[in-house]
Image: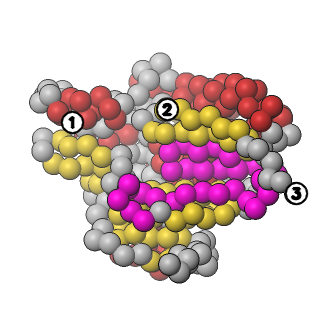
């Protein structure tokens, strides 16, 4: 039996590369429309870089409590669940911290500003309030006055999951959605499974893995979403304990899980936990691939070994 033809679309969004693949080529135009619509809705709900987003309006207008839209309430619930599962290593209260580190607009603009030596505006940086200061009951969110939230650690992965489920349910096709390092699948897989290339930097030796139908994979890296601030290297994976980019032995971590949200929660937490990452990841039982800062490879949880040359 011949392998069915796949159809795909590639584009750039949120300073990252995106991909949509369907097992039914005739479904691609409709799948593209559904994904574009849902991603636009998610951006309007929780973008930290749109002053008119619901999240940023919330930061300006709330007085300790707010009623969220159903979508933002769901995204907030995802973020709080990730915080609970990781004992706060993934924390949605880091918005002001990231602003203080210079990540206050689209990443390309942040890099351009530094390269042209433009002085960023003076910013008073607050310590993270901590996820335990947030209480979500249905659509009602209780939070400290003036707190700026950031859902970047969970919303992109959650968006990949939501897009894959939407396309599969509406169009009855197998689908893979990749938003940067967050990859979700839904519906039937192509013959032989979904083939995913794991490679952090172009200089790394790539590894191809096979995902079963419905599986997901995510990668967190300190080498991609980077910039400099007054000559100091920065990246987006912030340690809530220090308010600074996480340090540790790992350059990138990849995890396979039932959803992109769970996979990304694990990779982000492990990057933040640093030297404690191996013990913590072993406790999750999830297949994981860790690339140290200075080369080499560590695998856990049944991650497939490289094929012999």
Give the label on residue 13, or none. 2
Residue 219 horizontal/vertical position (percent): 49, 57
Q: Is residue 171 left or right of residue 71?
A: right
Residue at screen point 49% across, 70% down: 289
Residue 167 horizontal/vertical position (percent): 76, 37
Kindly identify which residue carries mark 3.
1
Name the quadrant containing residue 304: bottom right
Q: Are marks 2 and 1 in contact (CB under 8 Å)?
A: no
Q: Secondary structure at mark 3?
A: loop
Q: Are marks 3 and 2 in contact (CB under 8 Å)?
A: no
- As displayed, is residue 244 above or below residue 17? below
Give whichever of 68, 300 is nearer the camera. Answer: 300
Work out whether residue 59 can be spotted.
no
Q: Is residue 202 magenta?
A: yes
Kindly identify which residue carries mark 1.
124
Tag in front: 2 or 1: 2
- As displayed, is residue 272 above or below residue 234? below
Name the quadrant containing residue 126: top left
Q: Which residues are magenta?
A: 176-205
Give whichever of 220, 68 is nearer the camera. Answer: 220
Residue 53 horizontal/vertical position (percent): 50, 23
Q: Are marks 3 and 1 in contact (CB under 8 Å)?
A: no
Residue at screen point 51% across, 60% down: 198
């Amino acid at each position: 039996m011949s392998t069915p033809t796949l159809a795909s679309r590639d584009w750039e969004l949120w300073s990252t590369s995106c991909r949509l693949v369907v097992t039914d080529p005739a479904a691609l135009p409709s799948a593209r429309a559904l994904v574009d619509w849902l991603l636009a809705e998610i951006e309007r709900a929780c973008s930290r870089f749109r002053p008119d987003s619901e999240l940023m309006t919330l930061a300006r207008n709330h007085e300790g409590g707010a009623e969220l839209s159903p979508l933002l309430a769901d995204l907030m619930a995802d973020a709080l669940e990730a915080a609970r599962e990781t004992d706060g290593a993934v924390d949605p209260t880091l918005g002001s911290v990231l602003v203080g580190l210079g990540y206050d607009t689209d990443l390309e603009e942040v890099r351009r500003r530094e390269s042209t030596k433009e002085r960023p505006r003076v910013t008073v940086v607050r310590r993270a309030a901590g996820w335990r200061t947030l209480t979500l009951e249905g659509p009602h969110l209780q939070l400290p006055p003036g707190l700026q939230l950031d859902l970047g650690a969970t919303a992109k992965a959650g968006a990949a999951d939501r897009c894959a489920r939407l396309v599969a349910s509406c169009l009855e096709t197998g689908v893979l959605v990749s938003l940067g390092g967050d990859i979700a699948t839904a519906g039937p897989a192509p013959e032989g499974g979904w083939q995913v290339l794991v490679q952090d930097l172009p200089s790394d030796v790539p590894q191809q893995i096979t995902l079963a139908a419905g599986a997901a994979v995510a990668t967190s890296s300190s080498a991609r979403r980077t910039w400099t601030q007054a000559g100091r290297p920065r990246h987006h994976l912030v340690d809530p304990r220090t308010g600074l980019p996480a340090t540790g032995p790992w350059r990138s971590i990849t995890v396979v899980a039932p959803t992109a949200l769970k996979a990304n929660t694990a990779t982000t937490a492990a990057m933040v936990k640093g030297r404690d990452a191996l013990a913590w990841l072993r406790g999750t039982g999830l297949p994981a691939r860790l690339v140290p800062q200075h080369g080499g490879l560590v695998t856990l949880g049944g991650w497939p070994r490289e094929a012999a040359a």
